[in-house]
Amino acid sequence: MHPAWQHPGASVWWFVLPLAAAGGVLAAARARRLAAALIPVLCGLSVARPYLLLIDYAAPRFLLPAYALAAVPVAD
């Protein structure tokens, strides 16, 4: 049995950040700074891959480093 989530509205952030990272990569590509944005995103994807594909259970805390790397092009 799993406890009820106290703040389900907070889950929106987990879905918005990858979209914002894609927008940051597109903006960097238009500004001709693609490598500065693409490298952190690719590193984040490589960090997230084992947790997304190889582990049977889900825990968002495992993806925090990947989300931190994906936030770099959003901040740029």
Image: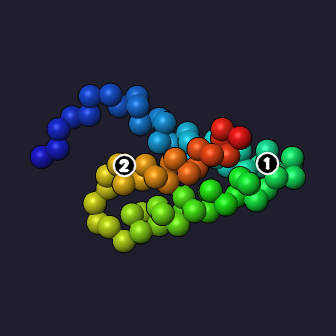
Question: Which residue is identified by label 2?
Answer: 60
Q: How far from the left and from the top, in percent, is residue 46?
A: 53, 66
In space, the residues marked 2 and 1 are separated at their CA atoms by 27 Å
Q: Secondary structure at mark 1?
A: helix
**Residue 12 vertical placement versus 72 (above, below):** above
Query: What residue lies at 39% left-to-right and 63% top-to-bottom?
Result: 51
Q: How many marks?
A: 2
Crowd band around label 1 with a 10 angstrom C-alpha radius: few (<14), some (14–19), many (20+)? some
Quadrant in the picture for residue 8: top left
Badge 2 element: helix
Residue 62 image point, x, y percent: 36, 54
- What amino acid is labelled 1 in the image? Ala
**Residue 58 x, y percent position in the rendering:** 32, 56
> For the residue carrying disc 2, how many other residues have a C-alpha within 10 Å: few (<14), some (14-19), or many (20+)?
few
- Which mark is in front, 2 or 1? 1
The C terminus sits in image quarter: top right
**Which residue is at the front of the view, 25 or 37?**
37
Position in image of residue 6 (x %, y %): 26, 28
Q: Residue at x 74, y 54 (%)?
A: 36
